[in-house]
Amino acid sequence: MTPNELTAGDEADITPSEPATDEERVELLASRVEETIERSVEQPFSVAVMGQTGVGKSSLLNALFDAGLATDPVRPCTKVPERVRRVTSTGQTLDFWDMPGLAEDATADREYLDMYRAKLLEADLCVWAIHADTRSVAVERALLIQLLDGLDGSERRRLLSKFAFVLTKADLLADPPWILGVEADHAKFVPQHAQLLAEKSGFFEEEILAQLGSDFRATTHNDGPSRIEEAEIEYDDLDTQVTWKGYLGPERCEALKVKWPEHVALLDRMRRTSEFVACSSLFRFNLQAVLAQMLGRLDDEAFLRFRNLLKIDTIDLIPNVDSALSRRNIIVLDNRHYGSRVFDVAKVALRSRSQWLLYGLNMTS
Amino acid sequence: VASVRTQHDILKTFRHAVERDSLEKSLLAGDVLKRQEATFTRIITSAMTDYWGASKDFSRDVADAVRQVLAHPATKKTLRTSWDVVKFVGQVVGIVTGVKPFLD
């Protein structure tokens, strides 16, 4: 079949100015595709971040996208969403919409709720940042219900499809000391005990996401020709995209992976999209998991912008070794001079980097 | 300072985490490329419907061809920029329609 073999109805839509030959038609199509992509990429990537003051909204975007946002701890004096525009180190323009009045308390004025809904629906991505050490979900759950109550079914699903739920400041929750691996030009933090973080994520998922019913959905790209036949699964018209209608919890996901072993990767991706990811901007911990979750929350145009923000190879690496070494309650693996020797910095009174090196020499000799 | 046994455990914990993170980064990079394939497929087929008035069956044929070519390892390595996509559209549509690709 060629473009010239279109149906009679299709042909009727083609005006005399349309290209006459197949080559011209293909050229036109290619230029339209290029225009669509260029138009999408030229727009700023718009991310709305909800969360209480001090939860680390700006720090999270700085860690993920090198956004260069000010991290001012001063409490905002306005409830109006505020936009900060930055061009990131990758050249992509990023619009950060701070939602300062949302998630501060369990009730919000209707006027502000309407404003927030509109901004959230406009954004490419909505991040709901919650302090990892929070023990109650009542405020977050009440606000989410308030936000969704004013929307019809399709709008609710559209809004929820944009949300990435993140637990911030995981460095304050995981038992210290953390392990700091030091290389020549970078460092990397690893928690010794991540079990508490996993339990916390599971708690938030059960208390918030599992309560949303089929309005909450996890979408990912399709891997191959065969299909998963489950009531909650939906494929798009072209079989390019798969959606799980509802919350996909860890037990259900594991059971599905046993039942559909050829779709393990796809199920893992959908599970990641349904997670509350615990991360630390300060320690650059688990940021790749946050990006993986975000990947599943973007429509096509937003994705084209998002991919221009990514620096995956270095996302978990801390470039400033001296700054990392100044942290307390860390165990250091120094791979530069001492070949993976271990030091507990919390037990060493450090005044300077040279003193630390001297101390390191003493301990390993 | 950690004992010898603890030091061994710490090293093991750290290296395990580094390996896991490295795998996750690799999976994420692969997922971004696959998501790109799916996105381009949808954009191309949508443009075909909008600008050609192409039938759904025809669009589906091209989408299948786009997917197959995009999934090829050689394509993944070379298809990086928007201009690559434009050339690629020309080639794939040319293959499906029997028209000689007009772009090299």
Image: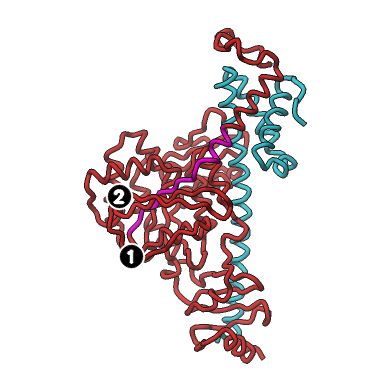
Chain colours: A red, B cyan
Label 2 resides on the chain identified as A
Total numbered badges shown on the rendered structure: 2
Gap between marks 2 and 1, in whole Å? Answer: 16 Å
**Toward the viewer: A124 or B10?**
A124
Could you tell me the amino acid type at mark 1? Val
Residue shown at the point (62%, 50%) measured from the top left: B29
Label 1 Cα neighbours within 10 Å, binned few <14 / some 14-19 / many ≥20: few
Could you tell me the amino acid type at mark 2? Val
Residue shown at the point (65%, 33%) measured from the top left: B67
The answer, for residue A278, to whether it is visible in the render is no
Image x and y of residue A197, in percent: 44, 64
Label 1 resides on the chain identified as A
Q: Is residue B57 magenta?
A: no
Label 2 Cα neighbours within 10 Å, binned few <14 / some 14-19 / many ≥20: some
The answer to whether the residue labelled 2 contacts the one labelled 1, judged by CB atoms less than 8 Å apart, is: no
Residue A74: which disc? 1
Residue A228: which disc? none
Query: In the picture provided, is A333 more to the left or to the right than A63?
Result: right
Residue shown at the point (62%, 92%) measured from the top left: A362
Helix, strand or loop under label 2: loop
Return the residue at label 2: A80
The quadrant holding residue A204 is bottom left
The answer, for residue B99, to whether it is visible in the render is yes
Look at the image and give the residue range highlighted in magenta: A36-52
| A343 in relation to A33, above or below | below
**Toward the viewer: A107 or B19?**
A107
Image x and y of residue A109, in percent: 22, 47
Image x and y of residue B96, in percent: 71, 23
Image x and y of residue A99, in percent: 34, 52
Helix, strand or loop under label 1: loop
